[in-house]
Image (spheres, rainbow, N blue to C red):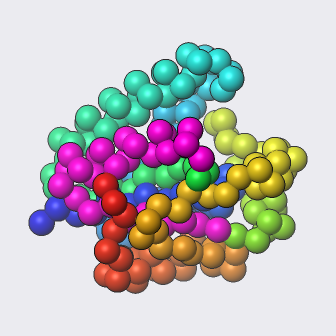
Amino acid sequence: MTAPVIHLCGWPGAGKATIGARLAARLGGRLIDNHLALDPAGALFDRSDPRHAALRATIRAAIDQAALALPPAIPLILTDALSDDAADDVLFAPTRALARARGARLLCVTLDLDPQENRRRLTDPARGQGTKLTDPAILDSLRARHALLRPDGAIPLDVTALSPDQAATAIIDALDLAAGCPA
């Protein structure tokens, strides 16, 4: 049986990587955090530089190719901070392609949280590693201009008052009920 590909989408600071790590540990899966591609690209190029997007796509393609070699029983958990606009739908396409290539259900979870709690988590000093966003003004601007990606069939989960373990439990409980997102 092929395990699902689980996509966690949420605002920067929502806890995607932490929740994803808890899910991976509990399900025996692998976490493919969006910063695996963002950090190397960001080390070389500013996000506004077209070479950033090209390098990020190349790295993501290599990660996805390697993931296809994993046994089908291993769930894959991917994270993203994507909006519901056309440019971000292009960034979501590799996740859909990965699920199709594995013959797996794509289960999408949209993590949302109260803006004040989001700002608190975003500015937590433990979040400062790598290229993670820590500027609350940028977060506020993103939240004012965009809505989170919510593919058809996505499971909404408000993580405002949930610990990472509670969020992972809620996602695991919802997996049995989810038909999946169109891949």
Picture quadrant where residue 149 is located: bottom right
Find residue 4 and report its horizontal and vertical position in percent: 28, 63
- Tell me which residue sits at (53%, 62%) in the image: 150
> In the picture provided, is 70 more to the left or to the right than 146?
left
Q: Nearer the viewer, residue 160 or 96?
A: 96
Magenta highlight range:
85-112
Q: Is residue 112 above or below residue 9?
A: below
Q: Main secondary structure of the magenta part?
A: helix
Q: Residue furthest left?
A: 1
Quadrant for the N terminus in the image: bottom left
Q: Can residue 118 be seen?
A: yes
Does residue 36 show up magenta in the picture?
no
- Tell me which residue sits at (62%, 58%) in the image: 148
Q: Is residue 102 above or below residue 37?
A: below
Quadrant for the C terminus in the image: bottom left
* Number of numbered labels in the structure image: 0
Q: Nearer the viewer, residue 113 or 126?
A: 113
Q: Residue furthest right?
A: 137
